[in-house]
Amino acid sequence: MEEKGLIYDVKLSSVGPGNVTGPDSIFEPGSMGLAMKLHYLRGVYYLERPAFEGLSTLEIKEPMFTWLNQYPPTCGRFRRAESGRPYVKCNDCGLTKFKCGAAAVGLSWAHVLGDAFSAAEYMNSLGRVATGCGPYRPINLSHTTPKPVNSNGRPKVVAEPLSIKRVDPVGDNWTHSSSIKMETFSFNLTHMQLSQIQTKLGGEFSSFEAISAIMWKCIAKTRVEDSEPKIVTICKREENNKMSHLRNGQVVSVVSVDSSTALADPSKLASLVKNEAFDETYMIEEAMEREEGLADFIVYGANLTFVNLEEAGFYDFEYRGEKAVRVSYKMDGVGDKGLVMVLPGPKGEGRSIVVVVPENEINGLKLELEKEGFGA
C-alpha cells in the first residue's frame, strides 16, 4: 500500500557546467548581495506544446551544459573564508511537462547571486544557447563586486540604513521566517486600467509610481493607525546596467512621510515616490562591510517595499522559437511589513502585481483594491 504523500513515478535528471572550472576560481558576493541573502525569487515560465515537443531528456540537457559554462557560480556551493565571509567555490532550475504537451520551466533563485534582472537575463541566455546563438558574452569568474570605498567626498556612514532590518543570526541556514504568517496573491492590470489610474493621479506619473501610490494607500487603510506604513522602500533597476555579469545592481531607496498615509491624496504619495526617494544603496553596502559581510539583514519587508520590475526581460525568454505565454515570479523571505512587485503583464501587455502581506490583511486589502478599480 502506497504511503500517503509519497512521491513516485517521477524521473529526475540533473545537469551542471560542461567544463570544469579552475581550482582557484571563486565568486565572492558583493555587499549588496550579502544583504539580500535571506531572500529568494521563485519564477515559472509557461510555454505551449511546441517548445519541448519531441525532445528527449538528453536533448533538453545538452544546451544547458554550454549555458551553465557561462554561469558556474549558480552551480557552486557556498563556503566560508577564514574571516567567515561567504564565497562560492567553483540554484536550481527545473522543467515540468504537462499531459497536454505544454511545459513550465521553474527557477529557484538565491538573491545573493543577483537581482531579478540578473535572474531574467540568466534564463534568457538559456533560450539563446538552445537556439545556437550562445550567450552575449562569457562570464568572468575572476570578477568580484568591489567593496565600497569612500569616494566623491561622501562622508563615512555610521547610522544603519532605514531600508534594512537586522534579524537574529541565522548561521549557515540562510532562511528568514516572519513572526506572522505571510500570504501571497497576484492580479493583472490592463493598459486601459493603467491609463485610467495615471489619469486619475494627474497623468505625470509612470505606471509604477501610480501603482505604488494606490497600493501604499490601500495597505495603509487595512492597518491600524499606529501601524500605517510611513516609511517605504523603493527598489528599481540601476541605470545603464549592462547585465554583463550576475549582480545585485538594484537601487534601494526610502521614502518617508509624517502624516497619515491612509488619508493621503494618492497623487501626493506618487509624487513622493517619484521625487523624494533617498538612495541608501551605498549605506547598505557600508553597513555590510562594517560587519565584514557576516550580519543578517532583510530588505524586502523591512518596510513596506515596492519593487519596480517593469523593465525586467521576463518575456524575452524563448525556447525553440516559442515565447513564454505567461511568466510568474514571487519572493520568499519577506518581512512582516509586506512587499509589492510590479512586473510586465502577460505577453508584455499591462502589468502583473504580486503582493505579499500578513494573512490577516488580505481580505481587507482586496476590498480596498476593488474600490480603486484594481479588481484583485
Image (cartoon, rainbow, N blue to C red):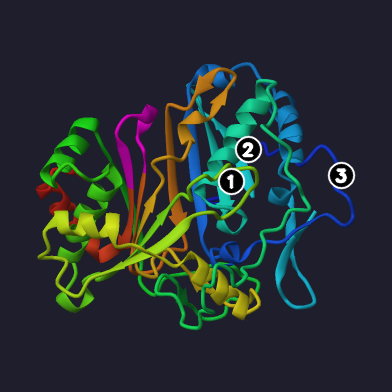
Q: How far apart are marks 2 and 1 (CA)?
A: 7 Å
Q: Which amino acid does label 3 sit on?
A: Val
| Side of 248 where 18 appears, left or right | right
Q: Which residue is drawn at 65% across and 72% down?
A: 172
- Nearest the camera: 311 or 100? 311
Specify few, some or many for label 1: CA neighbours under 10 Å numbering under 14, 14-19, or 20 or more.
few
Q: What residue type is labelled 2?
A: Val
Q: Where is residue 224 in the image (x, y as percent from the top left)?
A: 16, 74
Q: Quadrant of the C terminus?
A: top left
Which residue in the structure is indicated by mark 3?
A: 20
Q: Residue at x 57, y 39 (%)?
A: 121
Circle nearer the N terminus (2, 3): 2
| Residue at disc 2, secondary structure | loop
Q: Distance between the residues labelled 3 and 1?
A: 33 Å
Q: Which mark is residue 10?
A: 2
Which residue in the structure is indicated by mark 1?
A: 7
- Residue farthest to the front, as pictured: 153
Query: In the rendered structure, are the residues bearing label 2 and label 1 in contact, judged by CB atoms less than 8 Å apart?
Result: yes
Q: Residue at x 14, y 47 (%)?
A: 201
Q: Is residue 46 magenta?
A: no
User: From which residue to which does the magenta span run?
Assistant: 343-353
| Residue at disc 1, secondary structure | loop
Circle nearer the N terminus (3, 1): 1
In the image, residue 92 sits, relative to residue 182, either above or below, namely: above
Specify few, some or many for label 2: CA neighbours under 10 Å numbering under 14, 14-19, or 20 or more.
few
